[in-house]
Image (tube, helix red, strand yellow):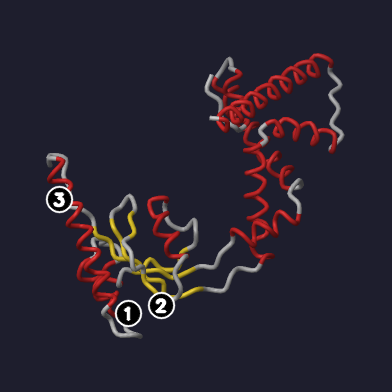
């Protein structure tokens, strides 16, 4: 049985007699997940939040890029594809050389000019290649290498080495940095992120959270049959998440 880490998945795997019962299970699972995440937030300590803020929260930066893609088609031979890739790399390197020749104080102007002339990103080229203000999670994962490189630059500096992404080859320019968000303004988001990470690393804590929440709100089950069914449900859930944690440990060892 394939396992995934939320209560909706657990409920689905338990099996249901009708579509309505299945829908009810999804809804209950959704509410349970919200309650569990809220409970997990209470487990996050202030020092964890402060550390995450210090290490992970960064200022927004304004970035422009020039993209060159290789003119590769499926019907090309490997040799033809290699030639097309080399031409694209040579093109981006020639653009970098042009930027190096730009007068001090006119790099941004030259960059915008070259973007309009050469960039293959039709969305940004007419705006000088501007991606606007970005942060670590602003762009899709295709831009991960570009974003990392941008944060290693200073304002007014461009990348002197070609940056390779899934999209092609880039040169980038960082032009501006905003003030870092205050801790109080991002504290809630950080807490939520850390809570989700905690639950991902400690799947069994999802079942334990429901047990603790029941104690907190002093929920008592009077009906003996319902109490028995609930106990079986909770035990099944506990076993499910123990298995998830064991799988994760095995993956870590590999």
Q: Earlier in the sequence, mark 1 or mark 2?
A: 1
Residue 218 sits above or below residue 172 on the image: above
In the image, what residue occupies the spot 30% across and 52% down? Answer: 167
Q: Earlier in the sequence, mark 2 or mark 3?
A: 3
Front position in the image: 45 or 223: 45
Taking the image as shown, residue 47 lies to the left or right of residue 199, namely right
Q: Earlier in the sequence, mark 3 or mark 1?
A: 3
Mark 3 surroundings within 10 Å by alpha-carbon count, few (fewer than 14), some (14 through 19), many (20 or more): some
Residue 21, given in percent of the width and then of the height, sits at 60, 22
Residue 243 sits above or below residue 205 on the image: above
Mark 2 secondary-structure assignment: loop
Mark 3 secondary-structure assignment: helix
Taking the image as shown, residue 190 lies to the left or right of residue 110, namely right
Q: Quadrant of residue 242?
A: top right
**Residue picked out by circle 1:** 107
Taking the image as shown, residue 112 lies to the left or right of residue 134, namely left
User: Which part of the image, by quadrant, shows the N terminus?
Assistant: top right
**Residue picked out by circle 3:** 83
In the image, what residue occupies the spot 51% across and 67% down? Answer: 60
Residue 150 sits above or below residue 25 on the image: below
Residue 142, given in percent of the width and then of the height, sits at 38, 51
Front position in the image: 140 or 216: 140
Distance, label 2 to label 3, CA atoms, is: 33 Å
Front position in the image: 31 or 186: 186
Q: Quadrant of residue 88?
A: bottom left
């Amino acid at each position: 049985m394939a396992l995934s880490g939320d209560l909706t998945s657990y409920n689905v795997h338990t099996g249901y007699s009708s579509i309505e019962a299945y829908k009810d299970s999804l809804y209950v699972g959704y509410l349970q997940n919200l309650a569990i995440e809220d409970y997990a937030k209470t487990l996050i300590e202030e020092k964890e939040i402060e550390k995450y803020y210090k290490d992970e929260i960064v200022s927004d930066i304004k970035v422009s890029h020039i993209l060159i893609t290789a003119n590769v088609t499926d019907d090309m031979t490997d040799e033809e594809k290699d030639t097309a890739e080399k031409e694209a790399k040579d093109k981006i390197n020639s653009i970098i050389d042009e930027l190096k020749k730009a007068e001090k104080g006119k790099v941004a102007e030259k960059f915008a000019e070259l973007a309009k002339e050469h960039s293959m990103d039709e969305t940004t080229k007419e705006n000088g290649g501007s991606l606007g203000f970005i942060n670590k999670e602003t762009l899709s994962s295709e831009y991960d290498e570009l974003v990392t490189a941008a944060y290693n630059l200073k304002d007014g500096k461009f990348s002197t080495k070609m940056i390779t992404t899934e999209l092609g080859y880039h040169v980038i320019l960082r032009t501006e940095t905003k003030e870092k968000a205050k801790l109080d303004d991002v504290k809630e988001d950080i807490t939520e992120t850390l809570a989700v990470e905690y639950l991902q690393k400690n799947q069994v804590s999802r079942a334990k959270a429901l047990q603790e929440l029941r104690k907190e709100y002093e929920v008592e089950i009077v009906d003996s049959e319902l109490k028995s069914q609930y106990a079986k449900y909770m035990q099944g859930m506990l076993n499910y998440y123990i298995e998830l944690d064991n799988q994760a440990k095995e993956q870590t060892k590999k």
